[in-house]
Amino acid sequence: MRILLTNDDGIHAPGLDVLEAIARPLSDDIWICAPSEEQSGAGHSLTLTRPVRLREHGPRRFSVSGTPTDAVTMALKRLLPAAPDLILSGVNRGANLGDDVTYSGTVSAALEGALAGIRSIALSQVYAKEGMADTVPFDAAAHWGEQVLRPLLDAPFAPRTLVNVNFPPISAEAVKGIRVVRQGFHDYARGSVVEGTDPRGYRYFWFGLHGIEHTPGHASDLEAIADGYVSVTPLHLDLTHEASLAALAARFDG
């Protein structure tokens, strides 16, 4: 089984090392292609206004000067001798829960794989404390990662679907188990934009990730993480709101 590993935290991110350790027992044919620098929040973006540069870091280990989607595209179209059987994206430093998946470069890398018809899974390690971005504990992901992945290796994936996995911000021993749950939704009424002044006296604005409240819904990924479970959520790429089709079509009839 050929596995492609990628992420949005960059080729040198500790979560990528965790992902490789999770994947090694599954295969000896592992390729890595990730952004050269952190691309958190890049979503499903492509680099179109400048060239993308490729760098080799070792056997089957590469980085690109672009987004997670660029990395997957480069791997599939230029690097791998044949399509991989599995794409794993992560392990992201931080949560990808609820509607935050629309911003996520981690999820979008898996989405790109799903578009190519490849079984794709995004993995993220939730962390609880502010100011610890460089010291995030990946214990839960490292211990539970293989247990989550093995049942998914031969599970049926519908076309253009992917699986989003999040590990709770607790020790591996404290994790209660694995829940398959739906995507939740955040309350963004209190999302933060932090204002400051740079050394030259100019104002700047920084979008904050903290202070955004959410209300866990019944059987959602938000609730599963809050309860101490690994969350496993199937996602699909069809954003059409079927219930609105007839009502909108009626607006243009006659």
Image (cartoon, rainbow, N blue to C red):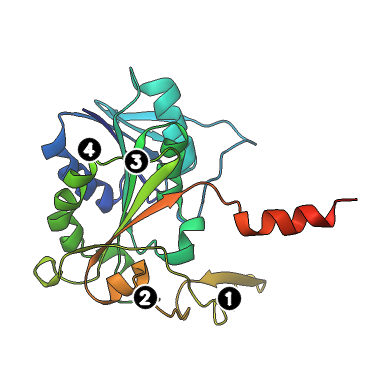
Residue at point 55% right, 82% down? 190
Quarter where residue 158 is shown? top left
Secondary structure under the numbered disc 2 in the rendered image: loop
Q: Is residue 135 left or right of residue 222?
A: left
Q: Is residue 246 left or right of residue 226?
A: right
Please tell me the numbered disc located at residue 193: 1
Label 1 vs label 4: CA separation?
Answer: 43 Å
Label 3 vs label 4: CA separation?
Answer: 9 Å
Q: Nearer the viewer, residue 61 or 125?
A: 125
Secondary structure under the numbered disc 1 in the rendered image: strand
Q: Position of residue 110 (x, y in %)?
A: 40, 43
Amino acid type indicated by mark 1: Val
Q: Is residue 50 left or right of residue 76?
A: right
Please tell me the numbered disc located at residue 218: 2
Q: Position of residue 224 (x, y in %)?
A: 29, 71
Please tell me the numbered disc located at residue 154: 4
Q: Residue furthest front?
A: 254
Residue at point 57% right, 81% down? 189
Position above or below: 236 against 75:
below
Q: Quadrant of the N terminus?
A: top left
Pointers 3 and 4 in contact (C-beta within 8 Å): no
Q: Nearer the viewer, residue 224 or 89?
A: 224
